[in-house]
Amino acid sequence: MIWTIVTKELRTLFASPLAWVVLAFLQIILAWIFLTRVDYFLTIQAQLARVPNAPGLTEIVVVPMFGIASIVLLMSVPLLTMRLVAEERRNQTMTMLMSAPISMTQIVLGKFFATLAFLAIVGGLIALMGLSLLLGGRLDLGLIAANLLGLLLLTGSFAAIGLFVSCLTTQPVVAAIGTLAAFLVLWLANIAASDPDSPLHLLSLLKHFENFINGSIAVADLIYFALLTAAFLILSIRRLDADRLRA
Amino acid sequence: MTTTASSELTVSAQALTRTYGAHRAVRDVSIELRRGEVLGLLGPNGAGKTTTMQMLTGNLAPTSGEVRICGIDLIDLPTKAKSRIGYLPEVPPLYRELKVDEYLRLAGRLHKLRKSALGPAVERVRNRCGLVDMGKRLIGSLSKGFQQRVGIAQAIIHDPDVIILDEPTVGLDPNQIREIRALIRDLGRDHSVMLSTHILPEVEAVCDRVQILHRGEVVFNDSIAGLKQFRGGQSLQIGLRNPPPLTELNGVAADAEIDAINANLFRVCPRSGIDPTDALVRAAVERKWGLYLLQPALASLEEVFVQLTHREDDQSERASE
């Protein structure tokens, strides 16, 4: 049943121009970054050869792409998640899902995995662009894998938060703005704390994502993203159930 | 379209109540529906029809009361009970960006139809709802009438035991209304159908039984014949161009009570079982009264409501018997 919702969400997502615009926009930005970074690498390649333990092709070209992608997705995921529930409410199509013999959990998970599938396409395209360098060079595949995993976990928690905010309103635009605000707060939570030991650092999405960028996969970061995602999915289910009770 | 007490009970709702804060939208509504029966839920806007239907379909949790669909408790086993229901809400839940076939297949999959059963099911409902050539059209480009049909099609794609239609004929032209009514009567043969409306003739045209809601309470629950009886039974309205004095009229129809509505129009209510129509027509021709109108004097919906709300106490006594 979850699969039915996933295919339905992807079908309606790709029926609108939004998904294509986001994909095209991301590809243009990342392709441009990719080319400038490759150019930069070629100019400094001779100097790098003389430095012991110098950063390689992966660190200079591929990793910055994932960093940029995380920022671009931070701004575009709200556009993808805003419609998930808010638009269904506004178009009164939510009734169809609520009347069908499926549980709220299945509805929420279906919508979440559909968004995640879209984000996986984005991540896959970035990885493919990086892997194209294998034609003429050597890459640190482990580092790319860590970056890709980090990006998926990060955007997975984006999707869960966006889904929850979309459950709160009937106005997709309000959902988008609310989601963006929530992302920025979580993203920048560490800026507010000047003390490096402040617990606010634990909250910051950026801090946890940075570890993946550097190629270290820590259990603490995995748990952080898993908890964040699960918490907002459960909140979404509760919110939709409350709809039925309160309406 | 006859109903027998022995046919299977498909919907049983007991003492449904729904409050929004201090406001009671629905109070103590009980509904029973059997297979092969069409029930009309009649009431003015804001009477609680939609709220009641939302509770019966699991879209809204009742504040108190219980709903059983084919014996399955809707609150304990929601997914199992919901698979027996087809629901068309007031606004059809249509994904405008999908094609009709895509949408109907989605509806079928949501109702757990097997992949092999999807194609034939879509074909069947398209035929039934007059959507034969519409399969490849985008729902957003269809007219209101066709969108309404797609809405009905998604409600019956899984061949449910109970079909609940919220104002199925709103916004349709007279031809489409006739087709939809024929479809509902057809569905009522082997399913249980419940529909809401605020149009009295519609209930009389398609339903076997009627429940009238007023301010969230059931004020009338009877068969269509009972409703007709209640609306005025045998009364007649008679129009005469050259009316005789009232006493002369009373002489012709001795058993009936006659009131003048205006100078030319009279209401005739037979007191005994004797129908005064023949006597009145004969006298009108013989004495040149200029008969130009003779029709059953049925009360309008508004008048029914006035009467119902006046005799509410009386009715609740009868219902508790």
Image (spheres, coloured by chain):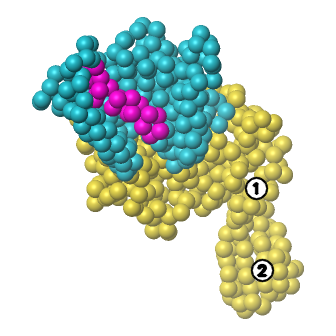
Chain colours: A cyan, B yellow
Q: Position of residue B298 (x, y in %)?
A: 70, 65
Q: Residue at x 26, y 13 (%)?
A: A53
- Mark toward the start of the polypeptide (1 vs 2): 2
Question: Which residue appears at 47% of the width and 38% of the height?
Answer: A75
Q: Is residue A31 visible?
A: yes
Asked whether B234 or A239 is in front, the reply is A239
Q: Does residue A151 sit above or below B297 in this rendering?
A: above
Q: Nearer the viewer, residue A217 or B193?
A: A217
Q: Secondary structure at mark 2?
A: strand
Which residue corresponds to mark 1? B305
Q: Amino acid at mark 1?
A: Phe
Count of residue discs:
2
Magenta region, residue range:
A55-76
**Residue under circle 2?**
B265
Residue extending farthest top: A219
Residues marked 1 and 2, same chain:
yes
Q: Nearer the viewer, residue A8 or A203?
A: A203
Residue A120 showing in the rendered view: no
Badge 1 marks a residue whose secondary structure is helix
